[in-house]
Image (cartoon, helix red, strand yellow):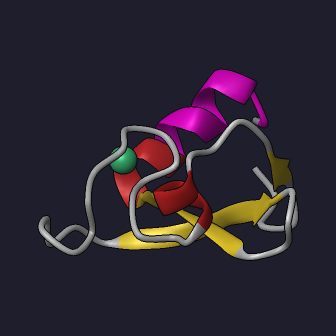
């Protein structure tokens, strides 16, 4: 997944980058490494746990 991908259907917390865009983990409560996976339709960067991001990439078959 490109970090410039536009990700739709996020809730407000996901749009703010406070929770995982994929599993919904709350980064204020859960200490988990997360990386930018794209942008919301309104521009801010959106984050996902490293594990979630890797899974999403695998499902898209970028190999
Ligand atoms: Zn996650």
Q: Is residue 63 above or below residue 26?
A: above
- In the picture, measured across the screen, residue 24 lies left or right of residue 17, that is left
Q: How many marks?
A: 0
- In the picture, measured across the screen, residue 28 lies left or right of residue 52, that is left
Front position in the image: 63 or 27: 27
- In the picture, measured across the screen, residue 34 lies left or right of residue 54, that is left
- In the picture, measured across the screen, residue 13 lies left or right of residue 60, that is left
On the rendered image, what quadrant is the C terminus found in? top right
Q: Quadrant of residue 19?
A: bottom left
Identity of the residue drawn at 60% across and 31% down: 58
Q: Is residue 30 magenta?
A: no
Identity of the residue drawn at 49% across and 35% down: 55
Q: Is residue 55 magenta?
A: yes
Q: Position of residue 4 (x, y in %)?
A: 87, 66
Front position in the image: 52 or 28: 28
Q: Is residue 31 above or below residue 51?
A: below
Q: Is residue 7 above or below residue 59?
A: below
Q: Position of residue 22 (x, y in %)?
A: 48, 40
The residue sitting at the front extreme is: 12
Q: Position of residue 34 (x, y in %)?
A: 40, 69
Identity of the residue drawn at 52% across and 70% down: 17
Identity of the residue drawn at 74% across and 76% down: 44
What span is in magenta?
54-62
- Give the main secondary structure of the magenta stretch: helix
Q: Quadrant of residue 2?
A: bottom right
């Amino acid at each position: 997944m490109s970090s410039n991908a536009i990700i739709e259907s996020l809730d407000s917390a996901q749009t703010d980058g406070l929770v995982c865009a994929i599993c919904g983990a709350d980064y204020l409560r859960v200490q988990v490494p997360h990386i930018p996976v794209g942008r919301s339709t309104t521009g801010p960067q959106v984050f996902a746990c490293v594990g979630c991001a890797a899974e999403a990439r695998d499902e898209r078959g970028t190999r």
